[in-house]
Image (spheres, helix red, strand yellow):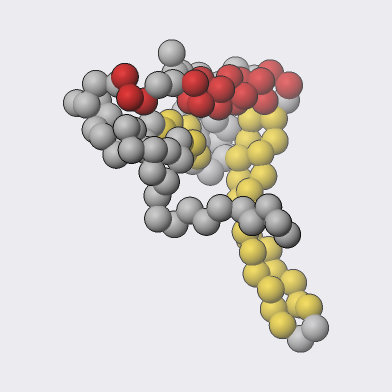
Amino acid sequence: MLTKKIKGNIDFFISQDKEEFEGEILEWNEIFIHGDPEGLRSLAKILIDLAEINQDLIDESLLPIGERKYITLLSGIDISNSSDNVTIGRLDAKKTGEFYDRYIPLNKDN
């Protein structure tokens, strides 16, 4: 069963970074996930449970065909007060297996 109960301590935040390189300003975001051992194990359990759930067996009134199972961890409720809200979800859609349009796969040849 998928639960969003986090045990231990865990913190999620986005760092917006900027650096000058050869006269150009480079900007990027970096996501940080920090936790104590119990918090990280708890997150791992959520990830494994989400990966193992069979979306095709979920009633269509709860998860229509083409939708994806996800869980949202809320700052100050599920995770630390200093965290940003975090949504963790399946990439593959129910019954179709399709990924959403913004996804660009890693080029493993590089």
Q: Position of residue 8 (x, y in %)?
A: 64, 20
Question: Does residue 47 appear anywhere in the picture?
Answer: yes
Q: Quadrant of residue 43?
A: top right
| Residue nearest the observer in this picture, 49 or 96 | 96
Q: Position of residue 14 (x, y in %)?
A: 60, 51
Question: Does residue 15 appear anywhere in the picture?
Answer: no
Count the labels in the image. 0
Residue 26, relative to residue 52: is it above or below? below
Query: Along the horizontal axis of the image, is 76 left or right of 27?
Result: left
Q: Residue at x 76, y 77 (%)?
A: 20
Q: Quadrant of the C terminus?
A: bottom right
Q: Position of residue 97 (x, y in %)?
A: 39, 38
Q: Residue at x 40, y 55 (%)?
A: 101
Query: Along the horizontal axis of the image, is 97 left or right of 32?
Result: left
Q: Residue at x 40, y 49 (%)?
A: 100
Q: Residue at x 41, y 33 (%)?
A: 70
Q: Quadrant of the N terminus?
A: top left
Q: Quadrant of residue 24?
A: bottom right
* Residue closest to the far bottom: 23
Residue 24, relative to residue 82: is it above or below? below
| Residue nearest the observer in this picture, 75 or 41 | 41
Q: Position of residue 66 (x, y in %)?
A: 29, 39
